[in-house]
Image: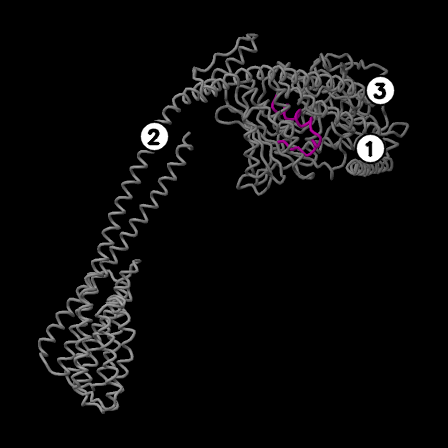
Amino acid sequence: MVAIAAVPLVLAMVFGGLRIAGAVTDARDLRLAADRAEMVPAITKYMSALDVALLATSAGGDVEGAKKNYDARKHELEARLAETNVASDVETGVNVLLDNGQTLLDAVATNGMPLRLRVTTYAPILLTAENTIDGSVRVRDERIRAAAQGLSRAIGARGQMMMQQLLITRGADLPEPELRTSMITLAGTEPSTLFGMAEVLGVGSPEAKTLQQQMVTRMSADSDPATKLVNNPILLKSVQTTDGIAAQLIKDTTDLVTKSVENQAHDRRNAAIRDIVLVLTAIAAALLIVFLVSRSLIRPLRVLRDGALKVAHEDLEREITRVRAGDESPPDPLPVYTTEEVGQVAHAVDELHTQALLLAGDEARLRLLVNDMFETMSRRNRTLVDQQLSLIDRLERNEEDPERLDSLFRLDHLAARMRRNGANLLVLAGAQGSRGDQRSPVALSSVIHAATSEVEDYRRVETSMVPDCEIAGPVSGDIVHLLAELIDNALRYSPPASPVRVSAGFRNDGAVLLQIVDAGLGMTDGDRRIANMRLRAGGEVTPESARHMGLFVVGRLADRHGIRVRLRGSSIDDARSGTTAEVYLPSTVLASADGVPVTPREMAPAVPAAVAPPDPPTAVADDRDAAGALVDANERNGSYETESSISLLPRRRPGSSGITGTPADAPPAPEEQPTQPAAQPVSNTSSFFGSRRLSRQRGKAEPVAPEPVPVAQAEVPEAEVPETDEVWSTEPAAPAAAPADDDLIYQRMLSEWLVDPHDMARSPDLDWQTVWDRGWSAAADIENVPVQTHTDQGLPVREPGARLVPGGAASDQNGTAHHRADDDNGLASNGIRDPEAIRASMSSHFGGVRAGRSHARETDQGTDHA
């Protein structure tokens, strides 16, 4: 409505403004022209005074009176020039008139200038006067311009008559031929001058005819050699007659030109005022009419707009809720009851409201149906994955070939990732997975390790500086899922050889801020802002949800528990590129919400269990209580439960979990796995996961088991699931009750995340002890001994031999290397050892290590190429 009314008003105002501007401009120009035309009388009077002064000085007469008159006219012209805004060429011409006229008059008064020179000097002054008069009258009216040109020609005629009179009266000073030549020359310029005067006087007027007759008379006398020119009365009379007509023309035309220009300026100013009044009146009338018409239309439109906004912002939501509740009554119509166009629009809005309610109900039912479909598909897929994991688990139990076992573990890992994708579908459907069944708190480090175990390239994840706190059980599963998505995203968009660092720390408000830093190319500011907007949206379903499923899942999980997730670039002081994902865990999701900061401890190695305390059975049970807190025993069925388990390590391909049944399979190569201090600032999971693969491949490469060298390392678990091999033999604290039909491979690959930790702890298969339990306790005590000496930079200084495990190694009768325990006196049961056998055993051992590593590299390269 405003546009419809504004367009004609704007056009009217524009055209009216142009009309007013044109009238004002014309009036201003004519006013300026009228002011400049006032220069014409001053110029004509000045030229007349100059002519009189030159004649009086040259031919005799009232010289003093002529000079006084000249001085007066000169001052008048100078004053007029100073008061008038004249054009630049006019100003220059007037100055030339003033200067050259005074110079000529002074020269004539001193009799220092010959007669002919006087004539030739005065001619340029006369021409300048004509041009100045033409330039002073610049108007569009042709009649006025013609009058101005006639006036300038009259000034020229008077000047020419003055020069001829001067030659006639003073011609005796010149030779007869020279005098006649000068007269003929001056007479030759008269036709153009007289023609300009005739334009004003009229071609057939008596004055014009007189001018022509007198010009012919003078030209005849000048061209007749027998006629005497000096003081010729006929010539003098002719000159005076022509000068009189020119003087009268100057007088009449000067008044005509100035008055005509003044009248035109006045008329144009009146016309401009009239146009302004008319335009303003028309605009005011148009505004009044538009206001009245708009008022009659805007009132019902306002009612329609307010009603439509109320329907959109208030009524529609309430009506949708009512329709979902089963009430099918129609909505109330808008209070517009007219039948014209506005009323018809109101009825259309009512119909739109009704259809919107119907569509909203259908959309809600369709969304519920789609969510149910997603949930059903996810749970069916989950059941199939459970069956697949169970089948893979049975195959792993009975498989002894390392290559096939490696493939089985790859399938196991792939199935675990498929299970997480199924969990994403549950989140998309808005359903609650089995992760929420956990009730006991879970350590934050365990949550991070569980999230790490659910990604593909988990060996690149490095965790450091995680505070010693616990996550509430009901939300721990969703946090594992959230962190797994962020870590997986960081791994996918960073170089294959670069690590992804995970760290956490307390905030002042008692919350925990967790950071996931990758070294990829990063994101542009625009993409990062869009991603953060999607995260803040809380998992709102949009067309982009399918393309950015990870952001959708993270946003919905974060919104479900009040967690804030933000992506940012690297800090200014960080030279690495990449993206940092910050996860703000409020105190409400922590098991202890008192908000008291806990001193951060160094992250434990990414292994199935932490370093064991002196009591191995207790340590194993406690660690499994923390690590297996999210195990869903009802849905596990003996296989790995990705969604419900947050065990510290996954089951992957050989070498992925690092859990074996033989302590002797710890990483033996110092150059591959150097000894570390008890507390490390960064824990790299790849070192531990790689140890498992090496141990598996070593078993294939070594036909005869070498005699391993015990190496105490921070990354190697010292308290783990019960060991089944007997390479370390001591007197057991309690007899082992393991079933006789358990497969050796399965016992070596068994980890606590496959089954419920509580059931495993109470299983009779695990209720046994070996003869080396005291050795394990001693190793744990040695491992926990703090470092006393530090370098200047604060790094610990390790003492050679300070962490050696008590015991010895000896060959049995069959030549197979086994670990023996020391007796109570600390002596080996067999005090005699063959150096050659020891050297052969060590050579065989390191040869097997090298063969295993070479085979592992070939296997990795083959997998990458595939």
The type of residue carrying mark 3 is: Asp
Q: Which percent across, then down, holds residue 825?
A: 76, 24
- Between disc 3 and disc 2, the foreground one is 2
The secondary structure type at the circle numbered 3 is loop
The type of residue carrying mark 2 is: Ile
Q: Is residue 577 above or below residue 354?
A: below
Do we see residue 561 in this rendering?
A: yes
Q: In which image quadrant can residue 154 be found?
A: bottom left
Q: Is residue 802 above or below residue 119?
A: above
Q: Is residue 105 magenta?
A: no
Q: Quadrant of the C terminus?
A: top right
**Is residue 469 found left or right of 744 in the rendered image?**
left
Cβ atoms at labels 1 and 2 below 8 Å apart: no
Other residues around mark 1 within 10 Å, as few (<14) / some (14–19) / many (≥20) = many
Q: Residue 743 bears which disc, if any?
A: 3
Q: Which percent across, then down, holds residue 598?
A: 53, 24
Q: Residue 289 bears which disc, if any?
A: 2
The residue that label 1 is drawn on is 698
**Is residue 422 found left or right of 101 in the rendered image?**
right
Q: Which percent across, then down, holds residue 387?
A: 78, 18
**Is residue 360 found left or right of 801 in the rendered image?**
left
From the viewer's side, name the closer residue of 249 and 139: 249
Q: CA distance from mark 1 to mark 2?
A: 99 Å
Do we see residue 90 in this rendering?
A: no
Q: Quadrant of the N terminus?
A: top left
Other residues around mark 3 within 10 Å, as few (<14) / some (14–19) / many (≥20) = some
The secondary structure type at the circle numbered 1 is helix
Marks 3 and 2, the one that precedes in the sequence: 2
- Write the start and end of the magenta stretch as one range: 443-463
